[in-house]
Amino acid sequence: MEDSEVLFLEFVGCEGRALVGWTTEGPGEVRLYASSDCGARWKRRSILPKSVWSEWPEHMAWKDGQHGTVWLEDTNGEAPPHVLATRNGGRTWSTPKQPPRGRPPAQPLESPFEVQDSKGTRWTVRHEDEVLRVERQEPGAPVQVRATLPTRLRRNGNTLVPSRAPGG
């Protein structure tokens, strides 16, 4: 996936999901990566099926670690928007018979983006240069960096590696 970018990043507890899309020469393949250890390790979970090549994710939402939805729109404006849903953590995707009514309002990732869970643990996502940094802080404890994710990726053989920014 030469020159890919992290499009969406979402955590439900310690279950993390990241949509990564190939962005060179138009909208390309979109892959879902998953973490079950609060972002310490990430594994490719699936490649999202697209109705037309020019579809691109506009929003991603997860109810829990198993149930997720991705809204796709045709960047050429020729095909209608469509929704993909998963009930197995993103291993497989299907178009629901009754898609959700409208998509949730977009919530742009501002840096830093912070949430606090019911136990008082604070999660922070910071966008710095060409990386997203995921931090976790339990009450009274120091901040732990749980993951550092590049925002641009390229393929090196069978491995995805960080890609330099254009002109960098």
Image: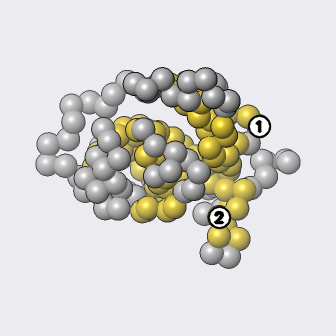
Q: Is residue 126 above or below residue 65?
A: above
Extreme-bottom residue of the structure: 157
Crowd class of label 2 (few under 14; some 14 to 19; many from 20; radius 10 Å): some
Q: Secondary structure at mark 1?
A: loop
Looking at the image, residue 28 sits to the left or right of residue 49; the answer is: right
Residue type marked 1: Asp
Q: Quadrant of residue 105?
A: top left
Crowd class of label 1 (few under 14; some 14 to 19; many from 20; radius 10 Å): few
Q: Who's the residue at 67% across and 40% down the image?
A: 145
Q: Who's the residue at 85% across and 47% down the image?
A: 167
Extreme-left residue of the structure: 97
Looking at the image, residue 128 sits to the left or right of residue 43; the answer is: right
Can you identify the residue that label 1 sits on? 129
Q: Quadrant of residue 83?
A: top left
**Percent position (x, y) of residue 102?**
26, 30
Q: Quadrant of residue 103?
A: top left
Between 75 and 114, the one lying in front of the other is 114
Q: Is residue 33 visible?
A: yes
Q: Who's the residue at 47% across and 39% down the image?
A: 10
Looking at the image, residue 168 sits to the left or right of residue 87; the answer is: right
Q: Which mark is residue 86?
A: none
Q: Secondary structure at mark 2?
A: strand
Q: How many marks?
A: 2
Q: Is residue 132 visible?
A: no
| Inter-mark Cα distance, 1 to 2 | 19 Å
Q: Are marks 1 and 2 in contact (CB under 8 Å)?
A: no
Can you identify the residue that label 2 sits on? 160
**Percent position (x, y) of residue 165?**
77, 47
